[in-house]
Amino acid sequence: MVLWAALSRSNLSPFDLLGVMAEMDVSTSSFDDAANDSDAEADQPSNSSVYSTVDVSNTGLDTIPAHYLAESADYSPRMVRKLVLARNAIVGLTNAIASFGNLTALDVSSNGLAVLPDAIGALDKLRTLIARSNLLDDNSFPKSLQRLTKLETLNLSGNQIEQIPSAVYDLPRLKALYLGANRIDSLPCKIGTIFSLEVLYLGGNRLREVPATIGRLRNLSSLALCDNRLETIPSTIVELQALQSLSLHNNLLRTLPTEIVKLRNLQQLSLRSNPLVHQFIRDMSFNPPALKELSARIVKIQVPVEINTQVLPPSLVDYIDTANQCVNPKCKGVYFEACIEHIKFVDFCGKYRVPLLQYLCSPRCSRSPAYAYTDSSSDSEMSADEAGPSQIKLKKVLLG
């Protein structure tokens, strides 16, 4: 073979020669074509395109071998499309990485990297960048990262990141973002601007809440928020109509937003290890409303608005306007600060029942309306689905 003869005449050791030949999944004719046109676009398939892999993972390297960076008559680093440097002892990538100008995939996972070089931005054909299980933190990412406009997959899991790198928001084709097992304790509202995202993995962080803007990621099919410290999920999650997998296990969730039942394409929902049901219902308490709220409730229900504005000071009128309607459809009551958290079990995806949180104006409303519209018996009773959960229903909740 022409390629083998050319490499044999080089200064490579037998071990290096075997590594190159074993890991380069290309034909001799492809290399000949690339030699004639080494600047050919990697993402424009044609008979003359070259797709090659150099895999030197798990070989104890502390830097990229010089012979992979060197030009020769029959080889150029620009011929390489996939470079795998995983599971080595590399603590720093030099700007020589730019020599692989046609890379579409780079894997530097499981090394000791503390920073990515500015030259990473020169790899403008890169579609996949895997840098998980390193020592990367918030100061490890150069601004040049935003020049990777063709990047589709970015894996930064298992590092020491506390905030999502700002360059991530400037990657127009990003489809999969993995940031699991980091130290992220909050998500900015700007997360909702990565419209191209299809997979978002944030498991194993320190998140306490998720911004409502998460609902703008309309292409999202998989969302992992497991192993965090979440107590609630925003109701805007209903806007993720492409969502098929939602991982929420190992959090502090007591309930789910009612809107979750509208995710018609959801196929996998993981809820295990959350205080979702029994203990929460048993320990649920109700703080009686203050005298001001009790008075405002009666005024809101019984006194016409036009009279309120004439006899009450503006501050009280404004306060009364903040009233929330009781969710019991048979109750005309309202509440302000004091309300009862009521768990309603709803059939979900035709497979199991999940607990959803609602707010009632009084504990009485879980059985019959506190402020009924009529006195008829038909209006004083709630349906079985609106009543408090029975022990039988509790057994149907999926927690794993």
Image (cartoon, rainbow, N blue to C red):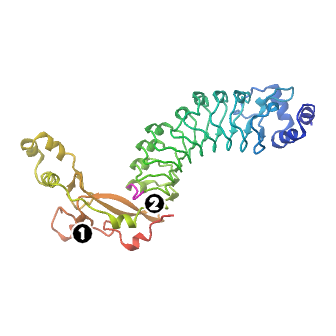
Dominant SS of magenta comes to loop
Position of the N terminus by quadrant: top right
**Closer to us: mark 2 or mark 1?**
2
Where is residue 50, by image quadrant?
top right
Give coordinates of residue 24: x percent, y percent: 81, 40
**Residue at image coords 42%, 57%:** 253
Q: CA distance from mark 2 to mark 1?
A: 32 Å
- Give me the disc on residue 373: none
Disc with the residue nearer the chain's start (2 vs 1): 2
Of residues 400 and 239, which is closer to you in this image? 400
- Give me the disc on residue 274: 2
* Residue 340 drawn above or below residue 54: below
Q: Amino acid at mark 2?
A: Asn
Residue 194 in magenta? no
Where is residue 311, by image quadrant?
top left
Give coordinates of residue 109: x percent, y percent: 67, 43
**Residue at image coords 17%, 54%:** 290
The region drawn magenta spans 253-257
**Residue at image coords 21%, 69%:** 378
Left or right of 377: which side holds 179? Answer: right
- Secondary structure category for the residue under label 1: loop
Of residues 138 and 8, which is closer to you in this image? 138
Of residues 254 and 373, which is closer to you in this image? 254
Extreme bottom residue here?
A: 392
Q: Amino acid at mark 1?
A: Glu
**Which residue does the numbered mark 1 point to in the structure image?**
381
Give coordinates of residue 16: x percent, y percent: 85, 39
Mark 1: few/some/many CA within 10 Å (<14, 14-19, 20+): some
